[in-house]
Image: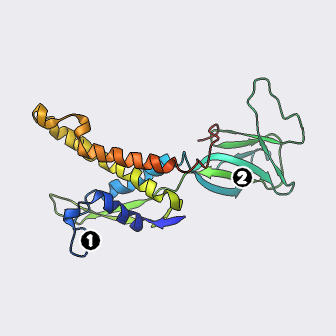
Amino acid sequence: MTTTWTAVDQKLDVFLNDPLAQNDDGTYRVQTYDRRLRINSWNWAQDIFVHHTPMQRRLTLTMRSGNREAILPEGWYAVEGIYDPDEGQWWMPMSRRPGYHQAEDETVLEYWVWDNRLYLQDSVSRDLVLYYWAYWPALEYTVGDNIGRENAPVYDIAMKAEQILVPRWAEIAMIHLTCASCLVPGAIEASDINQWKVWIDAGNPEHNPRLQQAWYHMQMYDNIMTRVPPAYSRRDVWQ
């Protein structure tokens, strides 16, 4: 369930780097797409992927305001359930039916979510465990000094952490979605250049090769994702 940015970056090279710029040992003389663009595109891909498969997390709640209210953790996506280990009981999400007051069985305890807070029907003085879905942690990096030529600047990009949390089956889908995002700026640039050509040379938007590649990677992402059922389907409490 974990990989590293170095491993992912090498796989992105297969789709994004110019094969004519390879050295004899198979390495690339130039990385075709800026590493900052690659990292940001991966983070965007994670925020799209979360709607299919969020990260599973759990924690012990710290109750406030008369033991009836708790602040949800940073990065939460949706609440899966509240469990009372002392009573061996799950709390139930409050119904939003018009005129509804509480569960018919008064022994069933209810909760609801509003903004970034969790509210309980009754106060409790014991620990409750929150099971929740979360966003995948974003990759963070720092930008160092220019290590390239002035007319083609290259900046030293240092990762704050190499580890990436992603399901193994989804890694190739995420790589395709990242590639699609990386190709869009080049497609826009090609469109800007084409506007100065005569009509027959400029072609139509669908003739843009970078745009065609972006659509290919999007289709590959969609094809892979349709093979796996969504891990999360309740869409009424997301952040």
Q: Return the residue found at the far top.
A: 99
Q: Amino acid at mark 1?
A: Thr
Considering depth in this image, is 111 or 29 the residue closer to the camera?
A: 29
The quarter holding residue 235 reads top right
The location of residue 104, given as percent across then percent down, is: 88, 34
Q: Amino acid at mark 2?
A: Leu
Residue 41 visible within the image: no
Q: Position of residue 190 (x, y in %)?
A: 20, 43
Q: Which residue is mark 1?
A: 27
Judged from this view, the residue extending furthest toward the left is 198
**Residue 132 percent location from the top left of the image:** 66, 51
User: Colour scheme of this structure image?
Assistant: rainbow
Residue under label 2: 130
Task: Indicate the secondary structure of the residue bearing disc 1.
Answer: loop
6 lies above or below 69: below
Q: Nearer the viewer, residue 154 or 34?
A: 34
Between marks 2 and 1, how big is the CA–CA gap? 47 Å
In the image, taking residue 136 as reference, residue 39 lies left or right, namely left
Q: Nearer the viewer, residue 214 or 125?
A: 214
> Residue shown at 37%/49% (left/top)?
217
How many neighbours does mark 1 have within 10 angstroms: few (below 14), some (14-19), or many (20 or more)?
few
Q: Name the side, left or right, on which 101 lies relative to 42.
A: right
Query: Which comes before the other along the chain, label 2 or label 1?
Result: 1
Can residue 100 be seen at all in this image of the molecule?
yes
In the rendered structure, find residue 125 and report the number of the disc placed on it: none
The quadrant of the rendering that contains the C terminus is: top right
Give coordinates of residue 139: x percent, y percent. Answer: 45, 58
